[in-house]
């Protein structure tokens, strides 16, 4: 059960931090109605494995199914609105000397909540690229709802969302920023990730080894809460406003 002193402890660490890295996962968007990655398989998607759909093999096997899965998820993101957890992280960015937000989420809810600098380490679902030549593709009307992925105007290959699939490399520039920030920060605030996808799951331990205080916000215990200095067990949309209130009230 969450103790008040843990909230105060977290607020003190955040208030004294010169540089905060915040790492978010699908859990931070859960209260906005965007299904988390591992339970995104509700209803008709329940019979598919997301790790299969989010891969070159899955796309090669059934491009139409993968295209429809992403179109459905994008529709969910567009219907969603940022929740209090997103809003607190945007405010925290504004009051911290150095703040690096690294998100595993492919949605744009952090941006819509007012976060200025968002590092999308697993890409973005609303940007589209050719799977072969990687040319960016502006969706034409109707392409989103068609059965098969659109064709690249430059080379004719299939178009896909600009997200990182399993087995694909992470964007180099973002990796550079994220790893450097994790090594330099005073506090790493982790919100809503199951901590099972690599190499991003290494970041909290890297930060801890470099001397940072690690705070984990999650309703469930997970590999990151095991190594965290402060584990705030609960929903991000509830916990983060409590931490912000303690911070603003000077604890
Ligand atoms: C790579 C984009 C190499 C797509 C995603 C064996 C061992 C170790 C590693 C591997 C292995 N075999 C393969 C690997 C590597 C693999 C990997 O880690 N696999 C794991 C699953 C074993 N990693 C990769 O393939 C990566 N690439 O390694 O490439 C390489 C190098 C050079 C050159 C070529 C290749 C790429 C990984 C990226 C995959 N793409 N997403 C898309 O979205 O469709 S990952 C996907 O899972 C999500 O995007 C997210 O990024 C990631 C983690 O999910 P979470 O965000 O944590 O969400 P999840 O649902 O899991 O958990 C939600 C959490 O929220 C829970 O803890 C829950 O309790 C909590 N929660 C719920 N409600 C709330 C809440 N928290 C707060 N508030 C709430 N209200
Ligand atoms: Zn192309």
Image (spheres, rainbow, N blue to C red):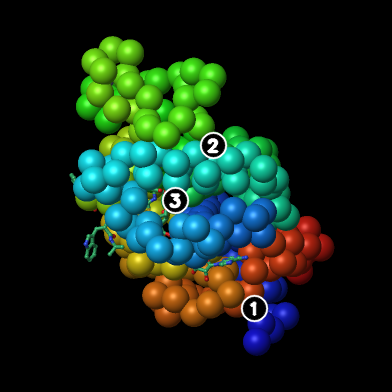
Of labels 1 and 2, earlier in sequence is: 1
Q: Quadrant of residue 241?
A: bottom right
Query: Is residue 117 at least partly visible in the picture?
Result: yes
Q: Which mark is residue 6?
A: 1
Residue at 37% in and 31% down: 149
Query: Is residue 102 at least partly visible in the picture?
Result: no
Tell me residue 144's x, y (percent): 49, 30
Q: Residue furthest bottom?
A: 1
Residue nearest the observer in this picture, 109 or 166: 166
Residue at 51% in and 32% down: 145
Q: Quadrant of residue 245?
A: bottom right
Tell me residue 158's x, y (percent): 29, 27
Element at badge 1?
A: helix
Q: Which mark is residue 117?
A: 2
- Asked whether mark 3 lies closer than 8 Å to ligand 1, one says yes
Distance, label 3 to label 2, CA atoms, is 14 Å
Tell me residue 251's x, y (percent): 76, 69
Is residue 130 positioned above or below 52 on the image?
above
Count up the numbered dots.
3
Choose mark 1 or mark 2, whichever is in front: 2
Distance, label 3 to label 1, CA atoms, is 26 Å
Q: Quadrant of the N terminus?
A: bottom right
Of labels 3 and 1, earlier in sequence is: 1
């Amino acid at each position: 059960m969450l103790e008040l002193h843990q909230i105060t402890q977290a607020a003190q660490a955040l208030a004294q931090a010169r540089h905060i890295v915040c790492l978010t996962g699908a859990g931070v968007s859960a209260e906005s109605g965007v299904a988390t990655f591992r339970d995104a398989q509700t209803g008709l998607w329940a019979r598919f494995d997301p790790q299969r759909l989010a891969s070159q093999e899955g796309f090669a096997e059934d491009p139409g199914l993968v295209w429809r899965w992403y179109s459905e998820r994008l529709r969910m993101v567009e219907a969603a609105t940022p929740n209090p957890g997103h809003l607190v992280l945007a405010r925290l960015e504004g009051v911290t000397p150095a703040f690096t937000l690294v998100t595993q989420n492919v949605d744009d809810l952090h941006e819509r909540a007012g976060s200025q600098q968002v590092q999308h380490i697993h890409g973005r679902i609303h940007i589209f690229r050719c799977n072969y030549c990687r040319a960016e593709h502006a969706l034409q009307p109707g392409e989103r709802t068609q059965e098969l992925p659109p064709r690249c105007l430059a080379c004719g290959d299939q178009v896909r969302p600009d997200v990182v699939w399993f087995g694909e490399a992470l964007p180099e520039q973002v990796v550079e920023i994220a790893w450097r920030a994790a090594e330099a920060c005073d506090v790493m605030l982790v919100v809503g990730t199951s901590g099972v996808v690599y190499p991003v799951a290494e970041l909290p331990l890297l930060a801890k080894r470099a001397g940072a205080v690690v705070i984990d916000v999650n309703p469930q215990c997970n590999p990151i809460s095991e190594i965290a200095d402060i584990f705030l067990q609960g929903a991000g949309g509830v916990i983060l406003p409590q931490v912000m209130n303690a911070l603003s009230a000077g604890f």
